[in-house]
Amino acid sequence: MTRERAKSFADRLPPVVPREEKDISHLSDEMADLLYPGRRPRPFRMGVVFEDFAGPQGEEAATLARRGAHQEVREHDRLYHRTGFDAASAADLRRLWELVGPRPGTEALVDGRRTPYASTLWLPLFFVFVGGSEGGA
């Protein structure tokens, strides 16, 4: 005969806040992933973070960045572009990487996170999705 386990203090408290929200559309993707993992499916994205720079290449880079899931971040009087692209937009990411990849401080992101080998392994693998007349990576 086994004894029933005593309730913990937290189990004895009445529910104050519902344990799960029914509508999570107001939450950011990051917050939804933390609070409710797997509840909001979203596409895998590769991304780039780079500092804004002047000139025609800078304008083209900013325009390309805005085609993806784009965010502008200000840090210490500097403007950074943070963007992500799904597989259908791999060609845009490749062109953006050609423009900003060699610049100091540019980072590649794997699904929105800094990851080891993101620029040397993950990006070339992602560029496999660039097809058609451009000839692949």
Image: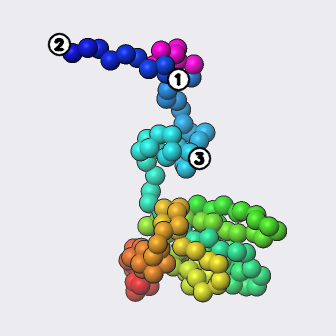
Residue that appears at 56% across and 23% down: 17
Q: Main secondary structure of the magenta part?
A: loop
Q: Using the image, determine if residue 77 lies above or below residue 11.
A: below
Which residue lies under the disc numbered 2? 1
Give how far across and how far down residue 33 sits, in percent.
49, 46
Residue drawn where x is 53% and y is 67% of the image: 114
Under tag 2, what secondary structure? Answer: loop
What's under tag 1, amino acid-wise?
Answer: Pro
Residue of label 1: 18
Q: Is residue 106 visible?
A: yes
Relative side of 122 to 74, left or right = left
Q: Where are the magenta residues, as a range? A: 11-16
On the image, which quarter does residue 44 sit in? bottom left
Q: Which residue in the protein does label 3 denote?
A: 28
- Does residue 39 appear to the left or right of 52 in the view shown? left
| Residue at the spot 67% in from the left edge and 68% down from the top edge | 81
